[in-house]
Image (cartoon, helix red, strand yellow):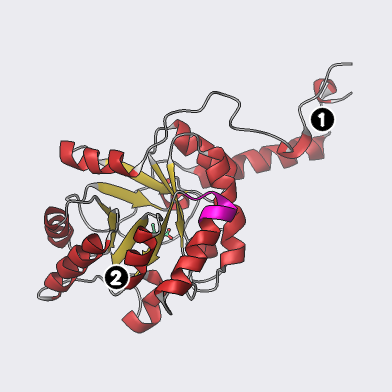
Amino acid sequence: MSEQPTPYGIGATTTAQPPLKRIRIPHLREMKERGEKWAMLTAYDMYTAATFDEAGIPVLLVGDSASNNVLGNKTSLPVTVDELLPLVRAVSGAARRALVVADLPFGSYEASAEQCFHTAVRFMKEAGAHAVKLEGEHMVPQVELLTRSGIPVMAHIGFTPQAEHSIGGYRVQGRGEDAQRLVSAAKSLEAAGAFAVLVEMVPGGVGAQITRSVAVPTVGIGAGNGCDAQVLVWQDMAGLRTGRLPRFVKQYADVHGVLREAAGDFAAEVAAGAFPAPEHSF
Ligand code: KIV
């Protein structure tokens, strides 16, 4: 009797092929030096991680945006470390080449450098993350301790979604004289050891100014074309999310439409008795 593939993806593996050379922090720095721009995408599960990895995306972020893009919360605030750990494990298990960055969720790192260290260690040990990301201009002690401990940190400045209530909603940051504050923050975080600075929702000129001011790569989201890299949430990029989208999103596909059509076709064939056909039956 011939062996069947396992149902529901049980035991499915995306790592049947030999390992590829992993993207590492120095590669990102070298790309900046060569003026090569790169793309980062969020991923929250094994199939998207493997697909984006295959597409050559060098950095995958398991964002706390899983809170609103996977778990159905209204904001990124409610998601917990225990909820994110299995998603990070799925992504780091599936990515053969990409560097996997785990986002530290709200409340898991702000109180002290020690709190931050213990949370980051969980993501590295229990989920196989290669680096972590944290939000805020004032996280220099956290970045210093993690860097000293061998944990690469991506710092996130500009609009920081975890602080949306103190910021007063989704607002562009760094306009006018405020730009200098962000440039100084990027420099301090770089000096503390951050391997990259993510810059969210700032005027394009400010994104470019920050990029020129630091030697580490900047990753922009709504920060103009002058950053070294660009990131989007995958459901935004691929058109799974519908409705009103932020100005900085470009949709490269209509995954929502494709899935809706496939689900409709499946339901129609089941209703008509056309599925399963003899070739799908034992
Ligand atoms: O969690 C997330 O998806 C982010 C985005 C800004 C990329 O931090």
Task: Tell me which numbered mark, 1 or 2, is placed earlier along the sequence.
Answer: 2
* Nearer the observer, 241 or 55: 55
- Magenta stretch, overall SS: helix
Answer with the quadrant where ligand 1 appears in the image: bottom left
* Nearer the observer, 268 or 102: 102
Q: Residue at x 51, y 38 (%)?
A: 95
From the viewer's perspective, is the residue at label 1 or at label 2 nearer?
2
Q: How many residues crowd mark 2 within 10 Å: few (<14), some (14–19), many (20+)?
A: many
For numbered disc 2, what is the local secondary structure? Answer: helix
Residue 267 among magenta residues: no
Task: Inspect the image, locate mark 1, and give the three-letter code of the amino acid beneath it.
Answer: Pro
Q: Residue at x 35, y 60 (%)?
A: 148
Q: Quadrant of the N terminus?
A: top right
Residue 257 visible in the snapshot: no
Residue 214 visible in the snapshot: yes
Where does residue 112 sit, x and y in percent of width and height? Answer: 41, 77
Q: In the image, 60: left or right of 195?
A: right
Where does residue 89 sit, x and y in percent of width and height? Answer: 58, 49
Magenta span: 124-129
Q: Mark 2 = which residue?
A: 140
Q: Quadrant of the C terminus?
A: top right
Would you place residue 281 above or below residue 136 in this image? above
* Nearer the observer, 100 or 151: 151
Task: Inspect the image, locate mark 2, and give the three-letter code of the amino acid beneath it.
Answer: Val
Q: Which image quadrant for residue 8?
A: top right
Q: In the image, 165: left or right of 9?
A: left
Residue 125 among magenta residues: yes
Q: Residue furthest front?
A: 148
Q: Mark 1 = which residue?
A: 276
The residues bearing labels 1 and 2 have C-alpha atoms spaced at a distance of 59 Å
Q: Residue at x 81, y 20 (%)?
A: 279
